Image (cartoon, rainbow, N blue to C red):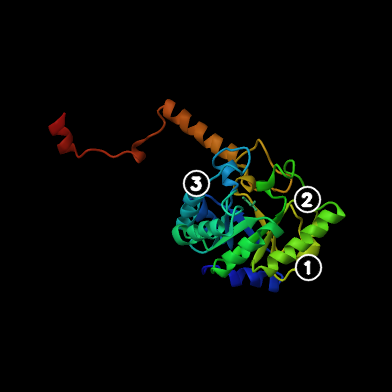
Amino acid sequence: MKKITIQDILDYKKSKTPFAALTAYDYTSAKIVDSAEIPLILVGDSAAMVMLGHKNTLPISMQEMKLFVKSVSNGAKNALIVADMPFMSYQSSVKTALENAGQFIKECGANAVKLEGGESIIPQIKAIVNSGIPVIGHIGLMPQSIHQMSGFKIQGKGVSSAKKLIQDSLKIQKSGAFALVLEGIPVELAQIITNKLDIPTIGIGAGPFCDGQIQVFHDILGLDNSFHPKHCKVYINLQDKINQAVKSYIVEVSTKTFPTSKNSINLHPSVLKSIS
Ligand code: KIV
């Protein structure tokens, strides 16, 4: 498989071929996901929750995100790697946005960046695109605006909020973004936006009519059984499988079943004789 480009992502829409995207946050998981031939890996700021254990995505810093993006870049050779810009790394000014987006590309090996927001961040999107960095927009349920939205709530259910999302999507496309994440919006609205745009939409909790779908690594692999979002399908229960494997290891150590000669190295008899 060859390295996925922005053109490849645009071509999925042109050829009406739905594509999958997934988050990853570290070298090993990125290597596994990449070897499964996923075209796009997002190093999401969801790392704040699934990797650092925070209650929402707000606390994660650029420094923390850069570490995750670097590890993923080292593991994924073919997938397009998109770095999620964390809260307050782009909202305050165009200059801050440009500097931080540049660091993801220059220092961490990302191929593109993603920013949450509509009309208010259009200047940032334009400036980043003009500097040669590909951008993915993100509208609908925006976890970085959790307080403004009064929680993780589906967006665009009423006429005015749905119209606003349609307008925002068109403005983001006009600003030069090459794709748009639609999170937590009704199926029909996602379909309308997808049909209006030339760039691909990537849905999460936005129904089946988006051009692509994105999910969080930990959600689809069942790494945390304490919470399964409605939009996710659990393809394997890794929490239970890992738990069972660790329990087997504990039992085998305590019963002296592990390690065996297969896992051990012996001294040469002559060396043994001279030291014993
Ligand atoms: O941070 C994240 O993981 C995301 C996706 C789920 C779209 O923004």
Gap between marks 1 and 2, in whole Å?
Answer: 19 Å
The picture places residue 105, in percent across and down from the top left corner, at 49, 61
Q: Is residue 236 left or right of residue 3?
A: right
Label 2 crowd bin: few (<14), some (14–19), many (20+), radius 10 Å = many
Badge 3 element = helix
Task: Please state which amino acid type lies under the numbered disc 2.
Answer: Gln
Q: Ligand 1: does it lie within 8 Å of the C-beta at label 2?
A: no
The disc at residue 155 is 2
Which callout, 1 or 3, points at the residue further toward the start of the chain? 3
In the image, which disc is placed on residue 64?
A: 3
Indicate left or right for 184 with 27 as reference.
right
Type of amino acid under label 1: Asn
Amino acid type of the residue that numbered disc 3 sits on in the rendered structure: Glu
Question: Which one is in front in this view, the residue at disc 1 or the one at disc 2?
Answer: 2
Of all residues, the one furthest to the top in this rendering is: 254
The first of marks 2 and 3 along the sequence is 3
* Residue situated in front as seen by the camera: 110 or 35: 110
Disc 1 to disc 3, how far (Cα)?
A: 37 Å
Residue lying at the far right of the rendered structure: 159
Dots 1, 3 in contact, CB < 8 A: no
Identify the secondary structure beneath mark 2. loop
Residue at mark 1:
195
Please identify, in this view, whether the residue under mark 1 or under mark 3 is nearer the observer: 3
Disc 1 under 8 Å from ligand 1? The reply is no
